[in-house]
Amino acid sequence: MERPHATQTTSMKKFNPIILISLISAFICLSMNTFAQRHFVHPGLLQSQASLDKIYYAVQNKTEPQYGSYELLEENPLAQADYKMRGPFKIIARDGDYKYTKPKMEADFSAAYLNALMWAATKKETHAKKSLEILEAYADSLQLIPPTNDAPLLAGLEGNKIVNAAEILRYTYKGITASQIEKIKKMIVKVFLPVCDNFYNQPPYTNGNWGACVTNMYLGSAVFLDNLKMYNKAVDFYLNGYDNGNVKHYIDSLTGQVQESGRDQVHTMLGIGCLASTCEIAYNQGDDLYSAYNNRLLLGFEYVAKYNLGYNVPFQTYKEVTGKYSNLSKISDKDRGMLIPIYEMVYNHYVRIKDFQMPYTAKMIAKMQPEGFDSAHMGFGTLLFYSRDNH
């Protein structure tokens, strides 16, 4: 906002009180506007209200290719309104004494998220009720994620499903009550976030997909909880954190090689997929992390897509921050060519919104479209993002 230029000199003795009142009013309005800009947009994780509306109309009109992605969602057993919960549990873990809960709680949290998507896509209340039933059951029961090796992965991957489902229901479903929302908030704050904070407080010790998935969940939780301090912490980690899960440490600035490219392709795609989801949440909140470090994420996606399409890519031993994984001398062909649904969202942003070129990502999308389900990713990108030409 430009300041008005004075057209004449006014002495203090002759200062017009009307001008003073006008200036005070302008200052108040400016202050209120600045304060309003600090409020979070809701719904505002991976889906805004505008994008949810587009999803609904695409399904109602059977618009392709979105509708093909919806059909994959509709037929998924975890997206059914009559889904039978495997839990809830008081303690959940991916490993250790409670690892028996892993497949059951992962299915439950996926069902909560997928039913929330079905509610958004169809407005059938049975899906909203099912999603809420699962979230509330765990909110009433869950007490602990024990400090096992995989605890940060659990908190990141499964917590992300929870906050995305809860955000959709909270702002689109009138049947959810304030007490139910508070219970879900309490579960996130008391059970999931301490695991994430503990990860942040440790010196870097993991491959980058860990920090990427933790930060994805942390940023989403910050929005759901309207917590600006958490939000800034997650953004700062994405941009500046000393960890392999920070975008500038995870993706090489010249070639796009990913820190885990020498490990295998599934974990590589997990890492860049989580980074992309973090960017999408921030973008819905008015912050463009996609453009960070000269669109570093675009470079990483093109590198990964190119290699997994069968092309050769440059590779050098990656000097990552922990020193534990810096001895990988060649790119890994393990899981090469797997079709993981992470590409549509990023392509939508860089190509449809910003008019960049992503030729290898485009080829990957053409090969796998429509995108469907993946237990470690939010999936169904063709339904959720294909129609989004603006925010």
Image (spheres, helix red, strand yellow):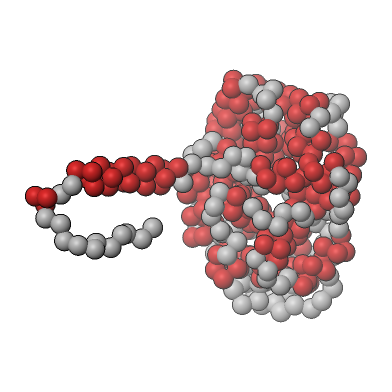
| Circle count | 0
Q: Nearer the viewer, residue 317 or 138?
A: 138
In the image, residue 294 above or below residue 14: below
Name which residue lies at 82% across and 65% down.
Answer: 364
Q: Residue at the spot x=84%, y=43% of the render?
A: 59
Placement of 136 over or under 20, stated as above or below: above
Q: Is residue 45 above or below residue 168?
A: below
Q: Is residue 391 visible?
A: yes
The image quarter in which residue 205 lies: bottom right
Give the quarter of the image for residue 145: top right
Residue 332 x %, y %: 77, 69
Q: Is residue 106 visible?
A: no
Which residue shows up at 68% across the image and 71% down it? 356
Residue 47 location, x and y as percent? 67, 45
**Location of the N terminus (image quadrant):** bottom left
The residue closer to the viewer here, 291 or 199, is 291
In x, y percent, where is residue 389?
A: 70, 57
Q: Residue, x 64% and y 36% (percent of image)?
A: 167
* Residue 298 percent across, percent down from the top left: 66, 67
Quarter of the figure with residue 260: bottom right
Viewer-closest of 246 and 63: 63
In the rendered view, does 57 fall on the left or right side of 279? Answer: right
Q: Image check: 365 left or right of 248?
A: right
